[in-house]
């Protein structure tokens, strides 16, 4: 799960997502191989090479590699289903499959991750080339949407962090998997990457401030592949000291708390069906390159108190604060 931000921050997020994908690829029984020499490289070696390049160069670098079924592990590599959920002012969902019959599709997946753009990065501060806005049923931008405090920075038009929607979509996928007898005993690995405090623009949210005197939230639908639920609230926001504040949705429900209970119930159920509960793995990452103590407190509370709770299910959970590229241990 990725949250769009600035270009440098986006590179951090992409590298973390690539690390998760590359490690899962090796665990599933695949290896990375150079095309020119057929030499085997580890995921760590490949990621170190990519980390030292721009996203464009890294995409080109990946053309020099392929993925093969590990010939030394005496077993066939497993198929790997990859779900990429990105969230900014709305939630998007892409799926990829790495299979023994087409293992090199994994390189395409890695290039797709590196090709991700932040919201509005290619469109700018306009709706002219954005068909998604009308598709989601979003209103015409007002003065708050178009406000641009710094001419070198984007306006509010594509601002936002629909984290509640992303987690509701994740719960939808996990619940479906837990209810599928053919998949529920398979391993599950999740990487959640967040850059800054989650926030929905106030005039779309179920809260009031100087920009909004309405407590009716704007419904933003999830993709059909994630359940197509209308999300009307941020559900949870943090103040500048890292203290949580909860908000009801348009139906008067404390949706964040309900999502947390449902999400952990789905993870607990998957752990029950698994022969090894620790094969259900959650890794959460918070980017904090300024060393902000309040942002660190926000991440600690958000990840460990308000989202994930493995005390009943016994699945694996960890979270990490990323302050620089050196904190990504390839």
Image: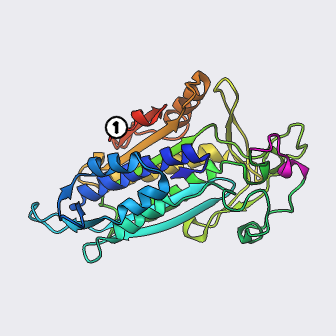
Q: Position of residue 126 (x, y in %)?
A: 80, 61
Main secondary-structure element of the magenta-colored stretch: loop
Q: Quadrant of residue 111?
A: bottom left
> Residue at (68%, 44%) from the top-left corner?
235
| Looking at the image, residue 219 lies above or below residue 7 | below
Q: Residues within 10 Å of mark 1 (few under 14, many from 20)?
A: few
| Looking at the image, residue 305 lies above or below residue 140 | above
Which residue is disc 1 drawn over? 329
Magenta range: 143-152
Quick one: quadrant of the C terminus?
Answer: top left
Q: Position of residue 239 (x, y in %)?
A: 70, 29
Q: Does 123 sit left or right of 40 as displayed?
A: right
> Residue at (72%, 60%) from the top-left corner?
220
Q: Quadrant of residue 240?
A: top right
Q: Nearer the viewer, residue 36 or 108?
A: 36
Q: Does 92 sit left or right of 32 as displayed?
A: right
Residue 149 is inside the magenta segment: yes
> Residue at (18%, 64%) from the top-left corner?
37
Q: Position of residue 318 (x, y in %)?
A: 39, 37
Residue 299 is inside the magenta segment: no
Visual colour scheme: rainbow
Q: Nearer the viewer, residue 133 or 217?
A: 133
Q: Does 171 sit left or right of 209 as displayed?
A: left
Q: Quadrant of residue 313?
A: top left
Label 1 residue SS: loop
Q: Position of residue 76 (x, y in %)?
A: 16, 69
């Amino acid at each position: 799960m990725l949250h769009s931000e600035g270009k440098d921050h986006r590179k951090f997020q992409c590298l973390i997502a690539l690390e998760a994908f590359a490690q899962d690829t090796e665990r599933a029984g695949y290896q990375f191989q150079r095309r020119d020499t057929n030499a085997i490289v580890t995921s760590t070696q490949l990621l170190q090479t990519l980390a030292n390049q721009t996203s464009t160069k890294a995409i080109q670098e990946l053309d020099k590699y392929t993925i093969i079924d590990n010939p030394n592990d005496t077993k066939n590599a497993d198929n790997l289903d990859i779900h990429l959920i990105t969230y900014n002012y709305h939630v998007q969902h892409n799926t990829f499959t790495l299979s023994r019959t087409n293992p090199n599709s994994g390189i395409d997946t890695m290039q797709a991750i590196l090709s991700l753009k932040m919201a509005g990065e290619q469109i700018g501060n306009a709706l002219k080339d954005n068909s998604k806005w009308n598709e989601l049923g979003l209103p015409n931008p007002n003065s708050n949407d178009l406000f641009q405090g710094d001419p070198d920075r984007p306006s509010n038009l594509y601002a936002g962090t629909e984290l509640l929607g992303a987690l509701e979509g994740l719960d939808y996928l996990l619940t479906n998997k837990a209810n599928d007898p053919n998949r529920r005993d398979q391993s599950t690995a999740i990487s959640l990457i967040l850059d800054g405090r989650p926030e929905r623009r106030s005039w779309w949210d179920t809260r009031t401030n100087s920009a909004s005197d309405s407590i009716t939230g704007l419904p933003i639908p999830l993709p059909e592949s994630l359940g197509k639920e209308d999300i009307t609230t941020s559900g949870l926001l943090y103040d500048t000291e890292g203290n949580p504040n909860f908000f009801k949705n348009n139906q008067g429900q404390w949706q964040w708390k309900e999502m947390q209970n449902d999400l952990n119930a789905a993870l607990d159920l998957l752990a029950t069906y698994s022969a090894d509960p620790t094969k259900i793995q959650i890794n959460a990452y918070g980017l904090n390159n300024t060393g902000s103590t309040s942002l660190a407190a926000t991440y600690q509370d958000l990840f460990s108190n308000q989202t994930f709770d493995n005390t009943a299910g016994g699945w694996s959970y960890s979270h990490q604060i990323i302050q620089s590229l050196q904190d990504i241990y390839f």
